Every structure is written in C-alpha cells, then in structure tokens.
Amino acid sequence: MLRLRRTLFAYLLGTILLVTACTPQPSSRFEQAQQDSTSRGASAVVKESASGGSFNRYFPEPGSEYERVYTQEKKGFAEAKLKKAGKEVAVMAISDILNNPSAVDKFKNSTEKIAGYPAVNQGSTGTAILVEDRFQVKVLSRDPSFTESDRKDWLSKFDLSGLSQLN
Amino acid sequence: MSQPIFELVDNLPTNNMTVMMLKSLDFVVPGQWQNLVGFENTIREVTGETDEEMIQQIGDRAVWLYNDKSQGYQKAMWLYQIVDSADNALGAAALANKVGNRIPLLGGLLTKVTPNPDKAQSLDLCIKLVVELVAFCQINGIPGDSIGDFVTALADYSGESLMRMAALICVDGLIPLGPDFILKAQSILGDTSPRELDSNATFKEVKDLIPGDDTDSQLGFIGESFDSVKGWMSDFVADKDLTPERVFGKFQGFLEFSEDKLDYVAAFLDMTTNYYEHTGTQTLARRLIERAIAEI
C-alpha cells in the first residue's frame, strides 16, 4: 500500500511538473503591439516619409562647450547625442509624423510655443515641438544636469524654418 | 514568425558562462557593462522614464519598429545570433549544474574540446568584425558598406557595444592567436582564397549579408574592413595594456585550467558562450528604445 501511495505520489508530482513546465509565459504588456505589428500589411514606417538623412542639416550647431554626435539615420528619423565634457547629457531627434500619426495628439492641448510652434513636455525627460503638423522635434535629457529649460533652449536652436520648408 | 523583441530581452540569462566571462572582462572596460536584462527594465534604464503610460507607449513603438522588416533590426539580430551559434551544444548539456562555481577544464570536459587552427580562428575574428560593421549599419541606418562611418562610430562605442568589442579582442584575438593577433590575422586573411573563405562555417552562414557581388569581392570587403579597424584595435590593446596572460588571469576566476592547456580555453569559450548574441540583443534593444521614445 505504502509503495502504491509512493508511486502515485511520484506520478502526480511528475504530472504537475510537466503541466506547469508547459504553461506558456504570462502574456506581456506588449503582446497586443506584437500582434498588431505582425498582422498582414502592418508597417512601422511608410515609404512616403522623408529620409532621415534629409533632417541632419537642421540640427543645431553644438558650440564650443558641447559635442554633437549623429547616432541614427533611418527612414523618417534622425538622432544625435549631445555630449558635454565627454558625457552624454541629452539626445536630439527629428521624426516624421507620417510614421506615427498619434504622436500629434499630445500637441492638441498645448498652451506653450517655442519659436512659434506648439510645444509640450512629455514624460519626465522630454520636450517636443510640432513643425507644420508634419515633423516632431524632440530633446530628451539623459542627465539631471540638463533641465527642461535647457531642452527648450536647444529646441529653439534647430533650423526650424528650414525644416518647415521640407514639408 | 520571429520571436518578439521583448521576449528576447526578457529571456537574456543573468548567470551563465557568457555572463561570467563578460563580468571577468570588466577590468578592460570598467563599469561599461552591467548585464541589463528585461525589456521593461531596459526602457526604464535607457530613458530614465518612470511614467507607466510612457513606458507602454515606448515599448509598443519599439515592438512595431522591430517587426517592420524594412528597418533592418531583424537582420541585425539574426547576424548577432548566427555568428555565435556554431556550437553551443556543449554549453547547455555539460555545464548545466556547474555555473556559479569554478568550472574545471580538465579530464572529460577537455576531451570534448578541440582548439581551432589559426586559420579558422583568424577568419572567425575577421568575419565577426565585419558582422559588427554590417549590424551597426542595419541598426543605425548608415549605408551598408560605409566603413569610414563605422570607424568613426567605434570611437564613440560605449556600454555593451564596447564590451562586445573588448570580448572580441580578448576571446577571439589575444587568447587564441597571441599578442600579435592583428598581424597574424591580417597575414592569414591575405593568404586566404575565395574558395577557402567559402568553406569557412561562419562565413557560410553570414555570406548573404556581407557586401560584395561574389566571394572575391566579399573577401576584399572583409580585408578592407579589418585594415580600417586594426588601428583602433591595436590602440585599444595598448591603452588597456592587454596581454593574453592578464586575460587568462581573470578567466581563472571562473575556469580552472592548467597553464599548458591555454589553447583549449579559447576553444572552450567559443563553444560555451554567445557574447555576440547576448550583448547584440542588448544593443539592439537600446537603439530601438532610443528611437521609440523620440518618435512617440
């Protein structure tokens, strides 16, 4: 009897282990995006968007205190790091709204303007402006020493009138 | 369908041979690599954001970008995976219960390891370097054969990317080929025929993504790339005062081996680690997240 019980117990334990081992991972909070972005015809970047290379010339000059390092240049997107004394303090980016139209929504309640364009703070590290309803220009702090007012200052240094004519 | 990017980052190991090896190389690039794992963790770390709605939006956009094949991220991921996957069978089976202690590279384990001849090892080093260049261009979007842009960017490498290069120099250069690994690899590459290159297992895997119309021009591209990067590599070795002995000394923290079996250490690490895939996944996640937060 004891042996039978032991056998049964071992069998049961084995079954439990097998079942729990086969249970799928808990669904990720990004699972919906995974499904949507892999459905037929989905794309994150549309061919009508401007080339990343065409944005580079509108980034601000770094001046003597800072160093500007271009880091990414993809369709509809360009990005550069801003370094001070060798340390990354911020990133600057221009992106084409065509690739992510919902990015416009946050500007609808904007009460502030930088260089005449609607501006918003986003999250705790970013400030963005919207140029001609088409291009988003964003500065993100990567170090606490680089404050919101620094972000606004650098946003105003972009060649925004040049960028507005790219539309 | 390929595996979701959040799963790849969530499933990165926190303690295996690769992690132990990379940790032991901290002395080369102090503080640059902390083995950041988990997709959400990476979003928080890279962006400094704490707002849950922002984290959701950043992650969603990163997932979309990764899944758009026209953007090159999946090609880069594939390159990092394939260049490392030559032989990991030994790693999983033989080492399952040894992680955490020093692994004795003696007796039975040793019989499963065969050192690579210098030729194969040199080609592996050169091909891995070109894979880094091609993956860099796929991720960052610079035209695929722009060696000059890559060399400029190398000077700005940091974090897990710099650690990957440090490991390449130590584990695929200094240890198997010795202190003059740059000269040795270059001379061997110079003597390699297109036919020999075609028969190299690593090259076969990545051939389709190496710039060039045929093997001959691909061989030329590999040589040109190596030539452009060798100055950076020799400066790196000199600046950090790297020698095979110093690297071996650090590896003795997690591997037990005798001095006369040094050539086995490189082969063993080659078989049991996938540092290109590991740190490549981390680099890719970082770049995707950086782009995502700027686009939302």
Image (cartoon, coloured by chain):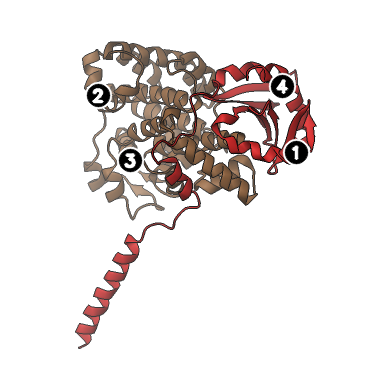
Chain colours: A red, B brown
Q: Of discs 3 and 1, which sits in the foreground?
A: 1
Name the residue that disc number 3 marks. B258
Amino acid at pointer 3: Ser
Q: Residues within 10 Å of mark 4 (few under 14, many from 20)?
A: some
Q: Of discs 4 and 3, which sits in the foreground?
A: 4
Give the structural element (helix, strand or loop) at label 1.
Answer: loop
Q: Of discs 3 and 2, which sits in the foreground?
A: 2
Name the residue that disc number 2 marks. B200
Name the residue that disc number 1 marks. A110
Report the side of B16 relative to A145 (left or right).
Answer: left
Question: Alpha-carbon distance for marks 1 and 2?
Answer: 59 Å
Instruction: Work out whether B164 lies above or below B40.
Output: above
Task: Identify the subunit bearing mark 4.
Answer: A
Name the residue that disc number 4 marks. A158
Question: Alpha-carbon distance for marks 4 and 1?
Answer: 20 Å
Q: Quadrant of residue B4?
A: top left
Whether the residues at callouts 4 and 1 have beta carbons within 8 Å, the answer is: no
Amino acid at pointer 1: Ser
Q: Can residue B131 be seen in this view?
A: yes
At which x and y percent is residue A63? Answer: 74, 18
